[in-house]
Amino acid sequence: MSDLLERLRGRGWRLTAQRRVVAEVLDGDHVHLTADEVHARAAARLPEISRATVYNTLGELVSLGEVLEVSTDGRAKRYDPNAHRPHQHLVCSRCGAIRDIHPGGNPLADLPAGERFGFTVSEVEVTYRGLCPGCARAAHGPDPA
C-alpha cells in the first residue's frame, strides 16, 4: 500500500474506489501531476471516474494537508503527495519538470533577524530553477563526435 493511502486510512478517510485510484495515481517520490494528468491516469485504471470527482478529491486532499498544491510560473497547478517531509522544488524553466530536493541547513533559521521586518516567519518556500538534463542537452545541441 502506498504511503499516501496509509496516511489516509490512518485518518479514517473513506476510501471509495474513485478516491483510492486518485491516491494511487499520486503515489511516488517525485510526483507532481496536474489535475488533468491525474484524471487521465485515474481514468486508465477506472474509466468511469469523472473530471469533477478528480478535482474534488484533489481539493479534499489539499484541505487535509495530505497533498501540496504547487504553482510555478503561471503554469497549471501540480499536486505533490510529499506533504509530510519538508522539501524544496527544483523546476526546469523550459519544460516545467519538477523534482523534490532536500538541501541541508534550515532556510528559516538562515533569514537574518534584520531581514524579517518584524514578521514572525512560520514557513519558507524556496524554488530552484534551471534546465533539466534533457532540456540542457537540447539547448546545447548534439555532442560533437
Image (tube, helix red, strand yellow):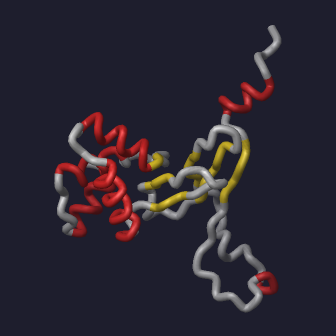
The residue most toward the top is 145
Is 122 left, or right, of 20 in this rendering? right
Q: How many marks?
A: 0
Q: Residue drawn 57% across and 58% down?
A: 71
**Res 49 quadrant in image:** top left
Name the spot of residue 108 as percent of width and height, x first.
65, 74
Identify the residue shown where x is 77% and y is 88%. Answer: 117
47 is higher (above) or lower (below) than 54: above
Image location (x, y in percent) of residue 139: 77, 28
Q: Quadrant of the C terminus?
A: top right
62 relative to 144 in the view: left or right: left
Q: Residue at x 73, y 26 (%)?
A: 137
Q: Is residue 90 above or below residue 108?
A: above
Residue 106 at x, y = what percent?
A: 65, 69
Q: Quadrant of residue 124?
A: bottom right
- Quarter location, residue 125: bottom right
Residue at 38 percent across and 45 percent down: it is 38
In the rendered structure, the answer to whether residue 15 lies left or right of residue 104 reads: left
